[in-house]
Amino acid sequence: MVEAIVEAAARILEEEGFLGYTTNAVARRAGVSVGSLYQYFPGRDAITRALILRETSALLADADAVAAEPTGRAGLERLIGAAVAHQLRRPVLARLLDIEESRLPLSADVGHVGSQLCAAISRMLDAPDMAWVQRHPFDADDVLAIAKGMIDSAGQRDERDDRRLRRRVERAVFGYLAP
């Protein structure tokens, strides 16, 4: 039932935006009573938190998996590809959840996404094949900001060509890192 409620919330956000996003609408779309919805979620913000957690968990799993890549460059490329795929899979939802992330006081399980991504990027930059990078304390933060900015902007423009976007982000990131 929880997954049905969370997916109903996602679909309402995608189709109707914030105006249609009410607990009554979510319950109706999920096929449950409002009372049942409130047994699992105390309000709309709790549903939004669960939705953010669901959507970011796949991206964080990909960030953890890049450690298996043989080189730092391959890890960065894989992470960029995962971020692009994440954004373009459900671009409207991704954009709206970005807005909600900045509005909501997020719990520790949701609020640490950026720090986990920065930690993964930092590990990749420390890989032996990346020794050519003249490291600065904020490199991982900058790489994340470059990628996030470009990917979010592409989502706002409703871009759909993931390969082209991935190549552009890689050019920007590796260009930034170049000595």
Image (tube, rainbow, N blue to C red):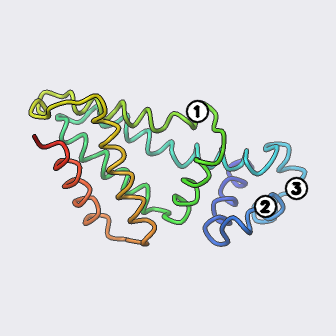
User: Could you tell me the amino acid type at mark 2?
Assistant: Thr
Residue 61, quarter of the rendered image: top left
Q: Which callout, 1 or 2, points at the residue further toward the start of the chain?
A: 2
The local secondary structure at tag 1 comes to helix
Q: Nearer the viewer, residue 177 or 61?
A: 177
User: Could you tell me the amino acid type at mark 3?
Assistant: Val
Residue 109 marker: 1
The residues bearing labels 2 and 3 have C-alpha atoms spaced at a distance of 10 Å
Residue 137 vs residue 72: left or right?
A: right
Q: Nearer the viewer, residue 159 or 163?
A: 159
Could you say where residue 94 lies in the image, as x and y percent from the top left?
A: 52, 58
| Residue at screen point 57% across, 37% down | 110
Picture mark count: 3
Residue 13 vs residue 67: left or right?
A: right
Q: Is residue 146 above or below residue 62?
A: below
* Residue behind mark 3: 34
The local secondary structure at tag 2 comes to loop
Residue 22 marker: 2
Could you say where residue 151 lies in the image, as x and y percent from the top left?
A: 37, 58
Q: Is residue 14 above or below residue 77?
A: below
Residue 137, quarter of the rendered image: top left
Q: Which callout, 3 or 1, points at the residue further toward the start of the chain?
A: 3
| Residue at screen point 26% across, 64% down | 163
